[in-house]
């Protein structure tokens, strides 16, 4: 920055030396000339050339170090922000994901952080450097010629008014851009995830029109942002041109009157140009800053969300449990005032298998979610082995509960990685025992790489039944005291169901089990069947007792 500001002085001296108008060298040239005892026009010009060259090399080295160090600092900060966001997202309650689309959340982690990165890697230091340049240049021009300096600065009040006008307009515009791109990402993610359904129902053209509409809104938002940015930059350029024109006119008069040398005039014009360079840069940085501010605001909106389910300050670890579950006048609402479960009273004994049945929307999945404390009861309580689950840590609670869902979720990685997910140092024999218990071992061994077979996203290179068997094996390996099956056999073929039904007797033995099912074969062996309707328990009894009614 400092070395770059020496260039106009050196150039001015070179012009005045060459034209024979020099009266006194600037302080840099004078200092160097005294050290090396330089005299004469030709020698002085040669000296100025080498000083100019040295200044250029120093400027290059300084800019390289500045950009390198700032890029490292920016990347480190953004790495920290991404880790903080990921950690925070892991802690947020399921209700947050009920309200927010995955694509929009991904947009905040990726696009909004990238917008912040743009400022942190280059913008911050450039803004500091721009203000430093402004200060030095203002000092230099007022030292050189007060009258011309005042003329050059006369456009500043107008510039401040223009900046004030664009400030609010640009902030709202760039916030709209960030929101628009998040909608595009959400729609794109949904269409990619649902590609099979889209093609099966020939929805390609309809979805293309919908995506085109969403993308057009994003385009409109970006064009509006471009218009705002261009308007600001154009206004700045007009004011810069006006200032330079005024300096040339009044400077020309001073040269004609013999009050100013040509080299001094050139130096002054270069300094005026350098004065407006940081203003031009700040205008560009201002646009960038507004984009980053919008992104940063959306990032901190996520970071500021408090998890609805938190460990109590005095929460203790849940000791090893037997599996005794008590619902005591428990009620729950997703939306305030609309109860999904109402005044549930139920005692589930250790080792008992409870089948939950009822029409769609009766509250079955919500019921089992309360046991894992994915949601908090709004009234009453849920306790396990006499411990109110709100008074124990979530980790110690969920480590003793296994869950198999209707839609199995497998992660990218090997089959073995998915079965041992969440557990360390698991012996191969333990894995084989779990897979044999659920009937998965044989099909895994028929695969070319067996347990080392790499699964594609969500295990898409396996059948639905095979994915479900791996989910069962994962639950069995964890050896939970409470096992929840949320319609785990609903979407599997008959052959796979036979395998699972054979295994279920061993899997459910000696552990408390909550089974949501519609199939008679799954319900038949339950100790008790709980019938839910509109969030209430309407009947309880064995399968035979309920059939008899």
Image (cartoon, rainbow, N blue to C red):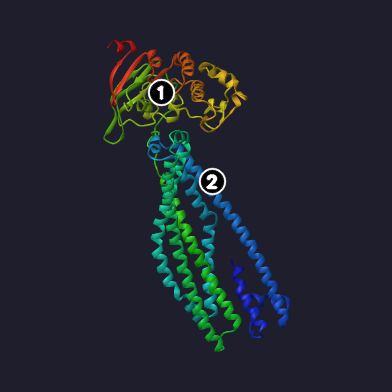
Q: Is residue 206 above or below residue 196?
A: below
Q: Position of residue 81 (x, y in %)?
A: 50, 46
Disc sitting over residue 320 in the figure: none
Disc 2 to disc 1: CB gap under 8 Å: no
Q: Tag 2, which secondary structure?
A: helix
Which residue corresponds to mark 2? 79
Quarter holding the N terminus?
A: bottom right
For residue 98, side relative to residue 273 (left or right): left
- In the picture, the quarter occupied by the C terminus is top left
Nearer to us in this view, 69 or 429: 429
Residue 299 visible? The answer is no
Question: In the displayed structure, would residue 507 be above or below residue 186?
Answer: above
Q: Which image quadrant for residue 208?
A: top left
> How many other residues sit within 10 Å of disc 1, few (<14), some (14-19) or many (≥20)?
many
State which tag comes first along the sequence, 2 or 1: 2
Residue 69 shows in this picture: yes
Position in image of residue 523 (x %, y %): 38, 16
Rendered residue at 34%/16% (across/down): 529
For residue 540, side relative to residue 312 (left or right): left
Q: Residue at x 38, y 19 (%)?
A: 324
The span from disc 2 to disc 1 (Cα, nearest Å) is: 40 Å
- SS label for mark 1: loop
Residue 433: quarter of image: top right
In the rendered structure, find residue 487 and report the number of the disc placed on it: 1
């Amino acid at each position: 920055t400092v070395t770059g500001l020496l260039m106009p002085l050196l150039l001015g001296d070179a012009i005045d030396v060459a034209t024979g108008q020099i009266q006194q060298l600037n302080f840099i040239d004078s200092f160097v000339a005294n050290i090396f005892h330089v005299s004469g026009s030709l020698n002085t010009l040669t000296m100025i050339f080498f000083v100019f060259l040295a200044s250029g090399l120093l400027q290059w080295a300084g800019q390289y170090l500045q950009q390198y160090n700032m890029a490292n600092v920016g990347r480190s900060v953004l790495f920290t922000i991404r880790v903080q966001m990921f950690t925070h997202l892991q802690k947020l309650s399921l209700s947050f994901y009920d309200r927010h689309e995955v694509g929009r959340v991904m947009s905040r982690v990726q696009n909004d952080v990238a917008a912040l990165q743009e400022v942190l890697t280059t913008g911050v230091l450039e803004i500091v450097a721009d203000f430093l340049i402004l200060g030095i240049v203002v000092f230099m021009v007022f030292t050189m010629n007060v009258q011309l300096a005042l003329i050059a600065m006369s456009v500043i009040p107008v510039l401040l008014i223009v900046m004030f006008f664009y400030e609010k307009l640009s902030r709202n515009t760039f916030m709209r851009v960030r929101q628009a791109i998040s909608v595009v990402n959400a729609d794109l993610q949904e269409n990619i995830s649902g590609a099979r359904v889209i093609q099966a129902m020939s929805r390609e053209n309809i979805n293309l029109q919908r995506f085109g509409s969403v993308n057009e809104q994003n385009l409109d938002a970006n064009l509006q942002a471009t218009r705002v940015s261009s308007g600001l930059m154009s206004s700045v350029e007009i004011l810069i041109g006006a200032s330079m024109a005024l300096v040339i006119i009044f400077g020309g008069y001073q040269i004609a009157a013999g009050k100013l040398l040509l080299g001094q005039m050139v130096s002054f014009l270069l300094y005026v140009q350098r004065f407006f360079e940081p203003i031009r840069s700040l205008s560009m940085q201002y646009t960038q800053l507004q984009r980053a501010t919008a992104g940063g605001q959306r990032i901190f909106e996520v970071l500021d969300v408090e998890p609805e389910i938190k460990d109590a300050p005095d929460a203790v670890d849940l000791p090893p449990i037997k599996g005794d579950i008590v619902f005591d006048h428990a009620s729950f609402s997703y939306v305030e005032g609309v109860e999904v479960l109402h005044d549930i009273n139920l005692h589930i004994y250790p080792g008992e298998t409870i089948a939950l049945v009822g029409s769609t929307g009766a509250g079955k999945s919500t019921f089992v979610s309360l046991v894992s404390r994915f949601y908090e009861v709004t009234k009453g309580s849920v306790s396990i082995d006499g411990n109110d689950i709100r008074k124990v840590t979530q980790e110690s609670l969920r480590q003793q509960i296994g869950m198999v869902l209707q839609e199995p979720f497998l992660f990218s990685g090997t089959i073995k990685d998915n079965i041992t997910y969440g557990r360390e140092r698991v012996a191969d024999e333990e894995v084989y025992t779990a897979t044999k218990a659920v009937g998965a071992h044989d099909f895994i061994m028929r695969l070319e790489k067996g347990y080392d077979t790499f699964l594609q996203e969500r295990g898409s290179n396996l059948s639905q039944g095979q994915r479900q068997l791996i989910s069962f094996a994962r639950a069995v390996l964890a050896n939970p005291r409470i096992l929840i099956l949320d319609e785990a056999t609903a979407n599997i073929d008959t052959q796979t169901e036979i395998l699972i039904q054979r295994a279920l007797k061993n899997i459910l033995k000696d552990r408390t089990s909550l089974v949501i099912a519609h199939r008679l074969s799954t319900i038949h062996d339950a100790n008790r069947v709980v019938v839910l309707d509109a969030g209430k328990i309407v009947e309880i009894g064995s399968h035979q007792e309920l059939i008899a009614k």
